[in-house]
Image (cartoon, grey):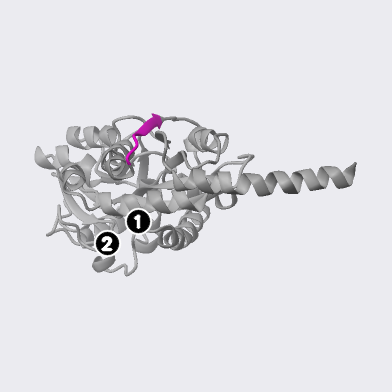
Amino acid sequence: MKIWTTRRAVLGAALAAPMIARAQDNWPSRPIRFIVAFAAGGAADTAARSIAADMQESLGQNIVIENRTGGNATIAANATLQSPRDGYTFLVDAANQLTNPVLMRDLGFDYQRDFVPVTQICSFPQVIAVKTEFPARNLAEFIAYAKANPNTISIGTPPAAGMAHLALAAFEQQAGVRLVHAPYRGGADAARDIMSGSIDAVLITTNSVRPPVASGKARVLAVTSIERIPSLPDVPTIAESGFPGYDMNDWNGVFAATGTPMGPIMRIASAAAVSARAAAVRTRMDPAGAIMVGSSPEAFANWLTDQRRTAVEVVRSAGITLG
């Protein structure tokens, strides 16, 4: 009986292999699903929708965006892992992939083991900005003032344990300053409070800082990216302001559950690489300060390795928690 069962299993696998191959040859034969771990209308959602709209033209199938928020992005991650691993469901996530393992207990899955990096969609450079009446005119003056007045400068980031919070903690450590952290639910909330003068400074994305800067209520001192950005060409980076190597952008990317066929993964990455450079996508995302990427799975994986090391080190050394 065991011999017959084994033979039947082998025969079944042999018959199934051509069917699987043909299915992958015909991929995609139906709509693709992007499960986005963030709310509709936010920067990550906007980036996902913008690039997906262009990608579906080249793929010949619709890409359906499904927002599954909550649980510090774990609800979306679990929904992806519970879906068939047939190349039709992908996760759009961000730095939670790096920080949740050290911030949360009993996740029930392992990000590095259970997810395959597909492509980085884009990065969102962040800025340090101060309200207009703040005495510092540049980052050096800001640091000098902070050292002379420790634990007095209030600075808002969205949210607690988010990428902006990590960028702030890394800046405090490297600059040797102590600021008063004010976590917000979103960048728009922090921008609102710096406009009203309720807080002294913010560390938020270039998109979120646009309203207070445009209204003359805030000015940008530095950007968190390794290079200057097109939307703020005259603003120096933190790296060039005395902190070489500092690079703490927000970002998002596409992931697949481990076991997803490589054919669809490579096709998604290839389509994203083309769409990241498409005029329609750039027209929508450039004003938001996004830097479109569209990297290969290998390049994205290597980049994540470096980012994970930095994120984990900052979370642990700064004692960052979700609470």
Relative side of 61 to 127, left or right: right
Quarter residue 210 falls in: top left
Q: Give the residue pinned by disc 1.
A: 248
Nearer to me, 244 or 19: 19
The dot on residue 104 is none
Q: Nearer the viewer, mark 1 or mark 2?
A: 1
Q: Residue at x 22, y 46 (%)?
A: 206
Q: Give the residue pinned by disc 2.
A: 238
Relative side of 157 to 100, left or right: left
**Residue 235, image x, y percentages:** 16, 58
Magenta stretch? Answer: 60-66
Q: Residue at x 19, y 62 (%)?
A: 236
**Around disc 1, counting alpha carbons within 10 Å, would you say few (fewer than 14), some (14 to 19), or many (20 or more)?**
many
Does residue 22 sit above or below 215 in this rendering? Answer: below
**Residue 148, image x, y percentages:** 29, 57
Q: Give amino acid for label 1.
A: Met
**Secondary element at tag 1:** loop
Q: Residue at x 23, y 37 (%)?
A: 191
**Around disc 2, counting alpha carbons within 10 Å, would you say few (fewer than 14), some (14 to 19), or many (20 or more)?**
many
Relative side of 294 to 33, left or right: left
